[in-house]
Amino acid sequence: MRERTALLLIAVAALVGGLARTDAGDLPAELPLPPAPDLAFYMKRVAPFVEASCASCHREGGGRFRLPPLAADGRVDRAADFVAVRPFVDRQAPWRSPFLLKVLSPADGGDEHAGGSFCRADDERHDMLLDFVSGATLDNLPPEVWFEEDTLRASPGDTVKVDGRDSFDRDCVDRSCLSYVWELVARPPDSQVSLADRRAGALSITPDSPGTYVVRLRVGDGHVWSAPRDVTIEVLEGGGRPASSSTRGSGLERLEPEMLVRVRRLYLDLLGRPPRPEEAWADGRRNADTLAADLLGRAEHGRCVVEDATVAFGLVDDDRPAGAEARDLALRVPSEGLSPVDIERVLLADPAARRLLSDPGTGPELLGAVLTSTATDGRLEPDENGRDIAAAYARVLAGEGPQDVPSLGRVDSVGSAIDALLASDTLADLAIRRYLGRAVGEDMAARHALEARLAVTEGAAAWRALLVRLVTERAREQGGTRRPKGRLRLLRSLFVDLLGRRPTDRELVALVRATDRLPGAIAPHTVLAKVLLDSGQVGLPLLVDIQDAPRWLTDRFLLHLGRRPAPEELQAYGRVLLDPDGGVELVVLALVTNAEYACR
């Protein structure tokens, strides 16, 4: 097994002796792509693994990964196998390559795989495969970017240091061969920040406004440049933070009730999750318009929008968008103010979506849903018009000649049908309705549909201004009917409220799949809440450590429901808390599984 830890220690020791050389002469205007998979490395190092672990299923065509059949004499054509493997390598993020993740144990971050896992993150096979997808040759192992932390927090005006000098090259352990180049790939729309020295090993950046900043580093060893890695800097306005503990609570009782309601609604509408207690404290006293504009400028908003769309369209796992435009889409949403139309067109133009649209088994269903449905919870349900579209499109896929496809006009090929879809006014209108439906509800989305379409036509500033106005109008509503969170927001809420973090992309997709398979009589979020509470990762106090039960119960109501309990609720939950068959976990489970929790 590669001694990576030892090499990192050597690199740190070298840092003590002096700074690494960072100026390697003039950089090209545009760096070349990270190295492609190497045929010779594959044939000597990787092919034996593929033939032993993958061929028995995938030479017969299992899944989207299909190895070519054996030659007539039974011999393996390793060069042909290499061609089949190459599309499952992500050069821009080798560690996320499907070829690697499908064989990696789920315990180490691998994907679901019908054939099981074949390696762990700490064994030689994983190292060999990671080398391959990273572009290793028999003569040179590519350098790797390394950060101690890849997510940082700051306030406007703080100077943030991002250190990339722990990056390393396994052919040059003292790091003298390394060159660095940084790029600022995302910043809030009103920020004027730029990078002073793009070739330094460590970078200093002083954010000038709230929002998300993303810097990207690549390192070169004189032969090839590494794949890029990002560091996200979340810049938030300052605010006093209460002391928080499992026994004393979150301190939310010190916030005015209307402030807590407003900040919760804005977080749910724009980030798809409730605020953590420290975020509610920092943002609860802020002006609603300012906070909404701040949340729109965070990368997490882009991530939420892209997650919602990809899950709704079924673009996950092997079908997740991985093209050049889609790769940074979540970052481009806040930094460029992309509209819903821009977002969906990028996703549907991606090779993964085009492949699904061109497949007779999935194309009609996806097209019909995209062109007819609104969605508020990650589900797309085509209506009667959708079925008409699907039927006409299926005839196109079957090669029956030109068809009059509703909403697309006359198309004579699969390619022209997809191009017509991307250019259609119907897609544009529905993309806006889908986005606003998730953010502010179907009623408000319908009332402002024309205004929203005009704002999108005017450009990013007009769209952003309209969105700020609508979500703040929604957040200021007091009373009225509650709106269901929807499936994805409910799943994220459970993770944030119980574990203090969002689910990862992989966790979210797995949870969506799991909830789809549960019987209709079972509330999926109830099952998930129980699983999380039984995981041992939820920080709950022992009953004997709760010195003020009414205060603790009030804090849990504020944390999970955004309001104080009524006197009768306080008495009822107090009895559950003290009952030998009840207790702390049962109180929390009751709060996060009731009907009110599932609504805004």
Image (cartoon, rainbow, N blue to C red):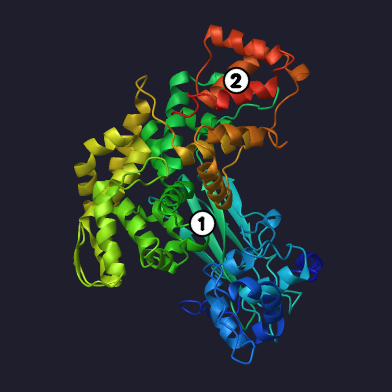
Q: In which quadrant of the rendered view does residue 5 lie?
A: bottom right
Residue occupied by mark 2: 555
- Relative placement, left or right, of 244 versus 356 is right
Closer to the camera in the image, 387 or 557:
387
Closer to the camera in the image, 234 or 385:
385
x and y percentages locating residue 527 in the rendered image: 60, 34
Residue 312 - label:
none
Residue at disc 2, secondary structure: helix
x and y percentages locating residue 173 in the rendered image: 76, 75
- Count the labels in the image: 2
User: Which numbered disc, 2 or 1, marks the residue closer to the eye?
Assistant: 2
Compared to 438, does 334 lie above or below? below
Residue at disc 1, secondary structure: strand
Residue drawn at x 66%, y 63% is 146
Q: Residue furthest bottom?
A: 73
x and y percentages locating residue 428 in the rendered image: 26, 53
Residue occupied by mark 1: 214
Compared to 71, does 547 lie above or below? above
Name the amino acid type tagged 1.
Val
